[in-house]
Image: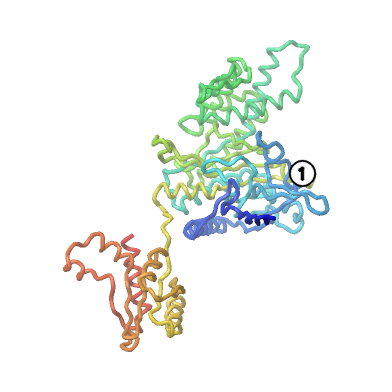
Amino acid sequence: MARDKKKKPVRPRALPPKGFRDYFGAEVAERNAMLNEIAEVYHRYGFDALESSAVETVEALGSFLPDVERPNAGVFAWQDEDDAWMALRYDLTAPLARVYAQHRNDLPTPYRRYAMGPVWRNEKPGPGRYRQFYQCDADTVGAASVAADAEICAMLSDTLEAVGIERGDYIVRVNNRKVLNGVLENLFGSVISNTDEDKELSEDYNRIMSDNILRTVDKFDKVGEQGVRELLSGGRKDASGAFIEGLGLSNDQANIVISFLKSKGSSSSETFNNLRKVVGNSGIGLEGINELETISDLLTAGGYGPDRIEIDPSVVRGLGYYTGPVYEAELTFEILDAKGRKRQFGSVAGGGRYDDLVKRFTGQEVPATGVSIGVDRLLAALREKGRISSQAKGPVVVTVMDRDRMGDYQKMVTELRNAGIRAEVYLGNPKNFGNQLKYADKRESPVAVIEGGNEKDAGVVQIKDLALGARLSAEIETAEEWKAQPAQIEIKRSDLVAEVRKMIARAEGLD
């Protein structure tokens, strides 16, 4: 009787889940350095750090993020043993609302906090679009004055410059959702006037139309004036040839929206005059314009001119909970896309006023405003500008020539570390010295330290400039040139730290 063959165990695939990725040394170091620079600016503005839980109750988060292909699944959620639903946070703002509502009696008013960390979105991943990414937020809770909004905009400008985005390569654009609400109020008045007297527009119709118009206006940068006009009226074909049904507005109604989007003038005062024409007698619209004027005056007084921060009515921001000023930081320099075409880098940060978010917990309106920086996009922008690279800065490697003298090598590496120099002892098989140097090259090490028995007896060590050696092997053609630029030198053992520091400085100067 034949024996049953044992099935081989199925090994798991060594791949991250779809939509996630791993980050290695240099990338993590770059991100941490950027977060430290951002935190320094936020701290200078008087904001305090807050580190909230990565897990919140679904009730605290509110509704799931919308995703047409994943209805009711915008967050990563699960049911706990007590039947309570919990989820990974999808941003840093909803947790802030919960924290403030919970601790408001112990917190100062206004409460100014910043938070940094990963967030998770259960959305369809795509090229450059991951389900886990870093955000860096700053918010002021409890301040109704738009001076808080002006301060956030100024801080955002300072932050971009602190991390390496030069003035002229970015613009912070500011608008006010109240102005757009005034335009919609004016617009719906136009709709009502064109209907039968006995027919009234329901609140649901107004809300649905407002949401649809907001989404359409938000596409202005992508599809342009004609594209928005077509989407507001009869519809348009997209780049793939598919027809997108329009909202059915008349030409007069579409003109009101287009006039709003094109109301930006050559100066702030001209922009405000244009906006007043568009909102007409709308009280909420005029209130929004007055707030924008106050923000503009405060920024001007602080030295933030239109070369850094400007009023721009085309900024809408997609999230529905914004109730007042909204702002967006856009990088204006050009990059090449996958097809080699020039395009602007685009937005790296955005935010606005959300006076209704804390109300979900307290029942009372609590004014709040804040900004969120997309850390991964900002890092990508700096790489595009050549301000940072993913080149790792490896440790000095102390090679092992004699297994029995590991104590000597550990003493060397301890001296280097105590002097603030990143260093390690080679811990692999030391039998093949060439493999040790290959390891140092793979680690992007600037210097290798070599001490055999003869060097030990003579009180010297050899230090090898690996960065210079790589250049010399590629560039130097004659023995004379090689002697003039030695990549390896002999030094006194007592001078190890000082000479390694010099060699590292020379290597960094050649980068």
Q: Position of residue 99 (x, y in %)?
A: 72, 54
Of 338 and 383, the residue lying toward us: 338
Is residue 114 shown to the viewer in this render?
Answer: no
* In the displayed structure image, the side of residue 432 where residue 39 appears, left or right: right
Determine the image quadrant of residue 341: top left
Quadrant including the N terminus = bottom right
Q: Position of residue 146 (x, y in %)?
A: 62, 43
Q: With respect to residue 443, does 450 lie above or below?
A: below
- Amino acid type shown at disc 1: Arg
Quadrant including the C terminus = bottom left
> Residue at position x 61%, y 42% from top?
352
Q: Position of residue 324 (x, y in %)?
A: 64, 38
- Looking at the image, the residue that sits furthest to the bottom is 457
> Residue at position x 51%, y 56% from top?
31
Q: Which residue is mark 1?
A: 360
Of 482 and 418, the residue lying toward us: 482
* In the displayed structure image, the side of residue 70 where residue 493 appears, left or right: left
* In the displayed structure image, the side of residue 405 where residue 70 appears, left or right: right
Determine the image quadrant of residue 471: bottom left
Give the total of numbered labels: 1
Is residue 139 shown to the viewer in this render?
Answer: yes
> Residue at position x 44%, y 72% from top?
423
